[in-house]
Amino acid sequence: MEVPAKRPLTTADRALLSLLDGDVGYLERFHKVKSLARRVRSTEYLLTNACNIRCEGCWFFKHDFDKSTNELKSVDGVREFARRERERGITYAIIIGGEPTLIQDRVAAFVEVMKKMPREGFEKVAVQISLFGGGKLDDELRAIKPGNVRFTGLFEQALRNYEGDPRACFVYAITEDGIDYIVDTVRRIHDNGNRVSFNFYSKYNQAEPLRMLNAPRLLAEAMRAKELYPTTVLSHPYFIRTIVTGDSHWGRFGYETCPSISVDHPDHEARRANGNPTLPLFNAYAADCKTVNFCCTSGHRDDCRDSQAVLSWLIVNFDRFRESGMLLKTWIEISESYWRQFIWAPYDVVSVPVHRRTMLPMAVSEL
């Protein structure tokens, strides 16, 4: 096959093209994801300890992260912190909480510093909305106010708040207790004009949070939802299998392999020396904007299967996917599915004029 003269082919390009059986399209897609990945350096920020609900299994409150530090409430202080992070080389801020929508002025301070844009509207801020279990199970697990006061209709409220909103992506923590709700929940998200990526619900109130009795059924139903709604469900089938089982074709996800650890945390010296890749410059900051937490979630090492950490694990292990052309194409597709979560990325599935697609290094995650 003749290769279009878009750019001179390097030796590495020719090797990849040979592995891809001459598929120039996949080679171009490979360069596109690699180019974007080189420009993005991420860190996670817990900007607030406050939240208006108390989800069962929320690691933040389960492990008393809200009590470990006092949050920095000064908008000017947050702005100065964001400026230091930008100077450190961070281009992509993952803002979580607590509940970030309760502190929009602090979120706006990050937006101002990371990329200039209008304060009002947050047009290019990606919004990730947590969903546990699906169906009525979401209310059972999440519709709980402080003081253990229960209510109903949490998922319905989220659908109303983000109907047709191209920024919104539901992060759906699937569980074997909610197998029968998966397809219908995805259908409702599809009908609402939003997208969804799968997470895994770890039952932290159990001795073995990741233990399941119906893993094959859970996996099959998640795959069925992907087949029925292929553009609404952003998660790649390879990732879906990994998030449910914890396994890739070369090994198992866990602390010794997870790349989403805070590089400046002193307890990771041995982990960083074991040869498994980590995310460059990544830290998880507490709400005081000083304390570096252990990792992107609870720090409970092998009891965690966070979706973003698992996705990062697959992506940073590019060399593991160079064993065959099929695996290389899978890696490219997994990488594209990751970037499709964010409206500012050039992989967003929503139709937006190309000249308006400006990259905003910001994602807001609702817990």
Image (cartoon, rainbow, N blue to C red):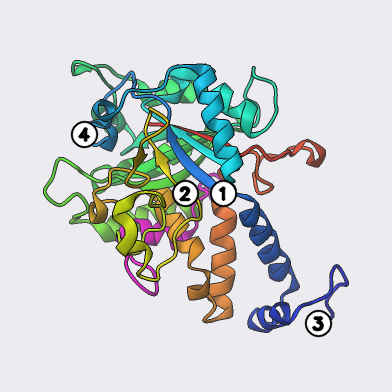
Secondary structure that dominates the magenta span: loop
Q: Nearer the viewer, mark 2 or mark 4?
A: 2
**What residue is disc 1 on?**
41
Q: Which residue is mark 2?
A: 282
In the image, 9 versus 229, the foreground residue is: 9
Please identify the quarter of the rendering in which residue 87 is found. Answer: top right
Residue type at numbered disc 4: Lys
Query: Distance of mark 1 from mark 4, alpha carbons?
Result: 29 Å
Cα gap from disc 2 to disc 4, whole angstroms: 24 Å
Q: How far is disc 3 from disc 4 in space, using C-alphas? A: 57 Å
Q: Which mark is residue 1?
A: 3
Using a 10 Å C-alpha cutoff, classify the residue at mark 4 as few (fewer than 14 neighbours), some (14 to 19) or many (20 or more): some
Mark sitting earlier along the chain (3/4): 3
Residue 108 place in picture, x, y as percent: 58, 22
Q: Which residue is mark 4?
A: 62
- Answer whether residue 35 is magenta in the image: no
| CB under 8 Å between discs 3 and 1 | no
**Disc 1 on helix, strand or loop?**
loop
Q: Amino acid at mark 1?
A: Arg
Magenta highlight on residue 247: yes
Q: Residue furthest right?
A: 5
| Contact flag, marks 2 and 1 (Cβ < 8 Å) | yes
Q: Earlier in the sequence, mark 3 or mark 2?
A: 3
The span from disc 3 to disc 1 (Cα, nearest Å) is 36 Å
Quarter that holds the C terminus: top left
The residue range painted magenta reads: 229-253
**Pair 3/2: label in front:** 2
Query: Which dot, 3 or 4, sits closer to the camera?
Result: 4
Is residue 292 positioned above or below 208 on the image? above
Task: Please tell me which of labels 1 and 4 falls first in the chain.
Answer: 1
